[in-house]
Image (cartoon, grey):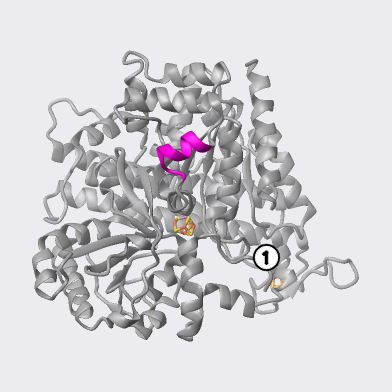
């Protein structure tokens, strides 16, 4: 293969070792899959019923309709909104879990958990219009959990979900209401998408896509509540210095990789690991227990506790190839099923923990919030046992790790700005956007994909936007890319930021006590924490008295692959944000759907998808969009 596979130096070091060991990785399987199916790439393959599969001939010679009569527009629209429904299901199920845990804590049923950030819980209650006067913290938690769970239960179609209503600008809510795309019940909206895309149901591509947008907004609702309630339970992120890349794995420690998405498990594993450190030392690990993160669970514990991040999506298998991971504990989402087989090539215990997410060949520990401490102890004990079987001759830990300053939630961003203007913290940010020191804001989100050399598009785009004085936020595997490549450091700001951006980041960082600038890219957390970026944007828009689609704000998922990214990208568009995709979305088999998402959306919502596979050109296009928005605001 001529394409470069990865730009991550630690991954590049381990790939030849994997080859020597006869281990096939995601890149080997990608190559074996070539050429990939062109019908699937265009989105024109339908497998919705057993008269099919049907596929539309994109060249116009063969069938233009499926056996039931569905044309390319219908098929593409159905396929893409089913992806949105799946993404929304993943995020909101995660959110529901957290909400139920909050309810359990309120009722005193879950000894492993407590409200670690009472101030945050009170702030959330206020936001949801819950009266807290004279209430103790358990009562507030119960009321917040109840209001949150209503977003999964409300049957009144005209009453939008509580969280979305509490989160967006008034103008945005009105605009979405007028299009009938505000969700009233997350579960119901996801169910509707599945129902309307059955054989013989909704065939109108516009109507289907509007249904998809509603599903994407349900996804947004689920993310908001997941983020905010996790903060209340586990603490709100604040800036912390840590490290990223496979070099964070320690040769003389019991290394436990936490992987997946939901912090309910990883938080307790981290806590119990602290208590069991001595046992690890007794087993011969002179550095005790070392927890490292992978994917979004990694981001969750990184921004809250400074746990180092070992890998983002594409290098999860390579963490195992180091031969030094004693246990990989996984919960839900983005876990390659190959990890159990690779773990078995070494001494590594791959442990699944969720009843609905098992992997053949892995050990399963049935994790329940009620028995979390006991489950976590068993997991850590399994890791210590596995450590005793580790073969030191097969250990290859790449000598690559980068410092990363992470943990920029809304509160810490506002806190840092408040050191410049305590009365009106947003003022310094707005002033610098208005005077052009900061041209605009870009949110980088989303995955890695084998369609792109790992991390390369993220890094190329960020460097270019930085040089053009764009303030950058990041979440998910995008944040992982930047952390691994040293772009979450003060040095990166000094090296890559344009002069005016550098001056602003230095002024804020210095006055916030960081002894230098803020890092070049601000790590806001996991994928569900994209809601944090929206909160910042809403605060700025409210202060300016404008809507989100007027701000010089763009989003980008340069290496997107997951159905969750489809959902996120779609709500980003629905909120009025121009949203770049750097991988080809599987919709281009329908000119109508493509036009809807890339052009018509602009009139309806203000946001739209912008597809550009070349990262340097993509950065240029986003800069143009930012300038266009500035012009609109007259700045
Ligand atoms: Ni987001 Fe996170 Fe990564 Fe993509 Fe997967 S871990 S939820 S889906 S691959 S960013
Ligand atoms: Fe074919 Fe229609 Fe069945 Fe899809 S729903 S597989 S297009 S017959």
Q: Residue at x 32, y 43 (%)?
A: 148
Residue 237 location, x and y as percent?
A: 30, 41
Q: Is residue 163 left or right of residue 268?
A: right
Instruction: Determine which residue is flagged by label 1.
Output: 200
Q: Give the mark count.
A: 1
Residue 104 location, x and y as percent?
A: 18, 52
Q: Quadrant of the N terminus?
A: bottom right
Residue 364 makes an appearance in the image: yes
Residue 68 location, x and y as percent?
A: 75, 70
- Residue 284 found in image quarter: bottom left
- Residue 141 found in image quarter: top left
Direction top: furthest residue:
423
On whether ligand 2 comes within 8 Å of the CB at mark 1, the answer is yes
Q: Is residue 276 left or right of residue 246?
A: left
Q: Quadrant of the C terminus?
A: top right
Residue 202 makes an appearance in the image: no
Q: Which residues are magenta?
A: 487-495
Q: Residue at x 54, y 26 (%)?
A: 499
Q: For label 1, count other residues whose C-alpha is less than 10 Å away and answer few (under 14), some (14-19) or many (20+).
A: few
Q: Secondary structure at mark 1?
A: loop
Main SS of residues in magenta: helix
Q: Residue at x 49, y 65 (%)?
A: 314
Indicate yes or no whether the magenta region holds residue 35: no
Q: Is residue 376 left or right of residue 446?
A: left
Give ligand 2's quarter of the image.
bottom right
* Front-lying residue, 133 or 287: 287
């Amino acid at each position: 293969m001529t394409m470069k596979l990865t730009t991550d130096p630690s991954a590049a070091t381990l790939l030849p070792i994997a080859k020597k060991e006869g281990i096939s990785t995601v890149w080997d399987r990608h190559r074996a899959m070539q050429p990939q199916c062109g019908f699937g790439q265009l989105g024109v393959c339908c497998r919705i019923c057993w008269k099919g599969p049907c596929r539309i001939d994109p060249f116009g010679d063969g069938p233009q309709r499926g056996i039931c009569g569905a044309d390319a527009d219908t098929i593409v629209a159905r396929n893409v909104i089913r992806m949105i429904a799946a993404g929304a299901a993943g995020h909101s199920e995660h959110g529901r879990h957290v909400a139920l845990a909050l309810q359990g804590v309120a009722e005193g049923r879950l000894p492993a958990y407590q409200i670690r950030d009472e101030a945050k819980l009170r702030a959330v209650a206020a936001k949801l219009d819950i009266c807290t006067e004279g209430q103790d913290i358990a009562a507030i938690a119960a009321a917040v959990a109840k209001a949150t769970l209503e977003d999964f239960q409300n049957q009144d179609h005209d009453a939008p979900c509580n969280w979305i209503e509490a989160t967006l600008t008034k103008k945005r809510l009105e605009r979405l209401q007028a299009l009938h795309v505000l969700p009233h019940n997350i579960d119901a909206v996801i169910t509707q998408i599945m129902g309307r895309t059955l054989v013989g149901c909704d065939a109108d591509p516009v109507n289907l896509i509007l249904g998809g947008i509603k599903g994407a907004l349900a996804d947004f609702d689920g993310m908001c509540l997941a983020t905010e309630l996790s903060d209340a339970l586990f603490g709100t992120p604040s800036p912390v210095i840590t490290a990223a890349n496979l070099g964070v794995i320690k040769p003389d420690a019991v290394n436990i990789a936490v992987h997946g998405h939901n912090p309910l498990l990883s938080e307790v594993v981290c806590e119990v690991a602290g208590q069991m450190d001595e046992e690890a030392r007794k087993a011969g690990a002179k550095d005790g227990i070392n927890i490292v993160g992978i994917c979004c669970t990694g981001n969750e514990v990184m921004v809250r506790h400074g746990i180092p991040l070992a890998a983002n999506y594409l290098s999860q298998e390579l963490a195992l190839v180091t031969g030094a991971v004693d246990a990989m504990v996984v919960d839900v989402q983005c876990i390659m099923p190959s990890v159990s087989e690779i773990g078995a090539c070494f001494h590594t215990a791959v442990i699944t923990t969720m009843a609905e997410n098992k992997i053949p060949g892995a050990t399963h520990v049935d994790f329940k919030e009620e028995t979390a401490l006991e489950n976590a102890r068993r997991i850590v004990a399994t890791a210590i046992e596995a450590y005793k079987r580790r073969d030191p001759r097969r250990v290859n830990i790449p000598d690559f790790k980068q410092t990363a300053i992470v943990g920029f939630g809304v509160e810490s961003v506002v806190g840092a700005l408040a050191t410049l203007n305590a009365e009106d913290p947003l003022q310094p940010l707005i002033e610098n956007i208005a005077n052009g020191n900061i041209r605009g804001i870009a949110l980088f989100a989303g995955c890695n994909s084998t369609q792109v050399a790992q991390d390369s598009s993220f890094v190329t785009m960020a460097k270019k936007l930085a040089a053009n004085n764009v303030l950058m936020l990041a979440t998910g595997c995008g944040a992982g890319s930047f952390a691994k490549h040293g772009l979450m450091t003060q040095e990166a700001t000094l090296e890559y930021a344009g002069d005016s951006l550098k001056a602003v980041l230095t002024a804020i960082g210095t006055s916030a006590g960081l002894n230098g600038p803020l890092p070049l890219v601000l790590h806001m957390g996991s994928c569900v924490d994209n809601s944090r970026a929206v909160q910042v944007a809403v605060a700025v828009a409210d202060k300016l008295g404008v809507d989100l689609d007027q701000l010089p704000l763009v989003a980008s998922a340069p290496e997107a692959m997951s159905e969750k990214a489809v959902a996120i990208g779609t709500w980003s568009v629905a909120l009025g944000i121009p949203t770049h995709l750097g991988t080809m979305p599987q919709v281009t088999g329908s000119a109508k759907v493509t036009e809807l998402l890339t052009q018509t959306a602009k009139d309806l919502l203000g946001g739209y998808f912008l597809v550009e596979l070349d990262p340097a050109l993509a950065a240029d296009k986003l800069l143009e969009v930012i300038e266009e928005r500035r012009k609109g605001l007259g700045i």
